[in-house]
Image: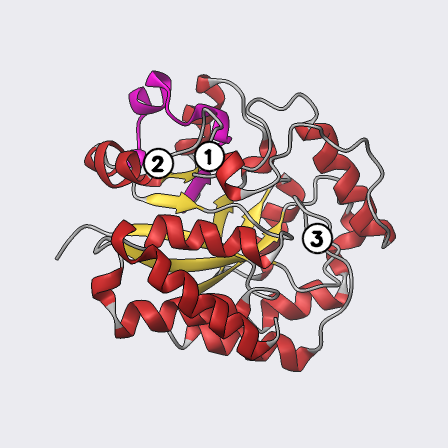
């Protein structure tokens, strides 16, 4: 059996049916897909989660919707990963009824939580010990010493800033098996406003409003423009040099983006080149059928 490339896809709430369609195609017609590719986990949050970070997600979700999403993915062996990475949390926010409900419904040892702050991390470890804890890229760890220290901690995985992609320093790091790489970041490489944007998004989640900051002029408008980033990991590198070097965990960006961007990234990273047009047409028909 080929070594697996574990992919972590956005967004388990908005893209639920799209991801499930890809999963079913991979199960039914594996010959169209890279043999190593596996949908291991889906990440995001349910609308209404004040613990959420990284992207502003407003709205609301019902208990029935939470249970539906969890069952659809977990019954297929796919973990649900919560982006509880709001860097602006205070202790009073830990008692939020809705966010606690999502974790209460997610027990069983399969599901995961991305964390940014020690406050959230300690709370989850104490109250939901069967949730797997993952260190988030939103920590903005910028030095090799900080990353190597993070890799020694009790995390299932550590998600790196995409600026480390395609560098000699990345391949010189220890614990490749514990590193998760963001393969297709839509933001510019080494964005100077990244940390400030995460903080404003965190405040907006707590205040139930849209974030207020200057739009970044360097955000890529589509998947193929984004491929020009220095940090973009091509499939040739991913299924070659990266996996040969022990890297096997790959996160795909796209939470909060239009279906067209998400669809193209799924097709590029999961589907063999000679079948991409065929799969694209199948996905577009499904999107039309579901009126997504």
Among the 4 quarters of the image, the one containing residue 176: top left
Over which residues does the magenta segment extend? 156-176
Q: Are marks 1 and 2 in contact (CB under 8 Å)?
A: yes
Q: Which residue is mark 2?
A: 234
104 lies above or below 50: below
The mark found on residue 227 in the picture is 1
Crowding at label 2, few (<14), some or many (≥20) Cα neighbours within 10 Å? some
Say which of 152 and 11 sits in front. 11
- Tell me the element at label 2: loop
Q: Which residue is mark 3?
A: 51
Residue lying at 34% horizontally and 63% vertically, measured from the top left = 278
Residue lying at 47% horizontally and 33% vertically, measured from the top left = 160
Task: Find residue 138 and report its horizontal and vertical position in percent.
Answer: 60, 36
The question of residue 89 being in magenta is answered with no
Q: Is residue 83 visible?
A: yes
Among the 4 quarters of the image, the one containing residue 97: bottom right
Q: Are marks 1 and 3 in contact (CB under 8 Å)?
A: no
Instruction: State left or right for residue 289 relative to residue 251.
Output: right
- Tell me the element at label 3: loop
Residue lying at 29% horizontally and 58% vertically, measured from the top left = 275
- Tag in front: 2 or 3: 2
Task: Find residue 113 and report its horizontal and vertical position in percent.
Answer: 54, 54
> Nearer the N terminus, badge 2 or badge 3?
3
Instruction: State left or right for residue 41 relative to residue 186.
Output: left
213 lies above or below 72: above
Among the 4 quarters of the image, the one containing residue 90: top right
> Nearer the N terminus, badge 1 or badge 3?
3
Residue lying at 58% horizontally and 74% vertically, measured from the top left = 105
Task: Find residue 103 and report its horizontal and vertical position in percent.
Answer: 60, 66
> Residue farthest to the left?
1
């Amino acid at each position: 059996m080929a070594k697996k490339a574990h992919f972590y896809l956005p967004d388990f709430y908005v893209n639920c049916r799209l991801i499930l369609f890809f999963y079913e195609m991979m199960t039914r017609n594996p010959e169209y897909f890279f043999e190593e590719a596996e949908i291991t986990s889906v990440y995001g949050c349910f609308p209404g989660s004040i613990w959420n970070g990284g992207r502003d997600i407003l709205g609301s979700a019902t208990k029935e919707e939470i249970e539906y999403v969890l069952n659809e993915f977990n019954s297929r062996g796919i973990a649900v990963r919560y982006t509880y990475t709001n860097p602006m949390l205070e202790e009073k926010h830990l008692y939020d009824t809705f966010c606690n409900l999502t974790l209460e419904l997610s027990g069983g040892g399969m599901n995961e939580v991305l964390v940014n702050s020690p406050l959230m991390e300690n709370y989850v470890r104490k109250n939901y010990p069967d949730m797997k804890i993952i260190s988030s890229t939103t920590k903005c760890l910028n030095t090799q010493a900080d990353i190597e220290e993070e890799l020694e901690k009790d995390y299932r995985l550590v998600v790196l800033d995409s600026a480390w992609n395609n560098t000699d320093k990345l391949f010189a790091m220890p614990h490749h098996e514990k590193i998760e790489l963001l393969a297709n970041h839509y933001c510019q490489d080494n964005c100077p406003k990244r940390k400030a944007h995460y903080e404003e998004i965190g405040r907006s989640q707590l205040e139930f409003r849209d974030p207020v900051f200057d739009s970044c002029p360097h955000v890529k408008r589509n998947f193929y423009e984004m491929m020009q980033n220095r940090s973009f990991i091509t499939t040739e590198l991913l299924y070659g040099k990266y996996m040969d070097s022990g890297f096997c965990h790959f996160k795909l960006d796209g939470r909060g983006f239009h279906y067209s961007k998400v669809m193209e990234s799924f097709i590029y990273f999961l589907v063999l080149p000679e079948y991409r047009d065929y799969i694209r047409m199948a996905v577009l028909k499904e999107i039309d059928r579901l009126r997504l």
